[in-house]
Image: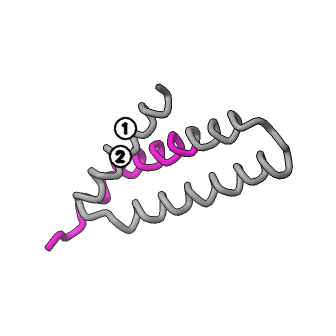
């Protein structure tokens, strides 16, 4: 259920920013979050040899991290100045 909440918030905010024309920031946040999640999951699985629930928790936390960054970007309001064709 935590994953569903994180995913819903992530999709809503990233979609709102993309619709407003702020695709570059959404791309940077998404790519950075995915790479960070990949590196942390690699260390958890290969180096730490932790159980699968830890890597799943890392994935869910990365969604919350991305959502936090989308929220900050949304409330900064810099997307309001973007010219959409």
Q: CA distance from mark 2 to mark 1?
A: 5 Å
Nearest the eye: 69 or 45: 45
Residue lying at the far top of the rendered structure: 1
> Where residue 25 sits: x, y (%)?
41, 63
Give the residue displayed 23% in from the left and 59% down from the top: 20
Nearest the eye: 32 or 58: 58
What label sits on residue 8 in the rendered view? Answer: 1
Is 12 displayed left or right of 52 in the figure? left
Q: Specify start and end residues of the magenta stretch as a single range.
A: 62-85
Q: Quick one: label 2, few (<14), some, or many (20+) residues within 10 Å?
A: some
- In magenta stretch: residue 77: yes
Give the residue displayed 17% in from the left and 69% down from the top: 84
Nearest the eye: 77 or 55: 55
- The residue that label 2 is drawn on is 11
Q: Is residue 63 above or below residue 32?
A: above
> Where residue 85 sits: x, y (%)?
14, 74
Q: Quick one: label 1, few (<14), some, or many (20+) residues within 10 Å?
A: some
Is 70 displayed left or right of 79 in the figure? right
Give the residue displayed 19% in from the left and 70% down from the top: 83
């Amino acid at each position: 259920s935590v994953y569903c909440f994180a995913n819903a918030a992530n999709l809503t905010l990233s979609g709102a920013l993309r619709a407003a024309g702020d695709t570059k920031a959404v791309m940077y946040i998404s790519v950075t979050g995915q790479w960070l999640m990949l590196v942390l999951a690699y260390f958890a699985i290969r180096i730490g040899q932790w159980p699968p629930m830890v890597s799943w928790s890392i994935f869910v936390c990365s969604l919350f991290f991305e959502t936090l960054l989308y929220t900050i970007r949304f409330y900064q309001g810099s997307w309001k100045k973007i010219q959409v064709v």
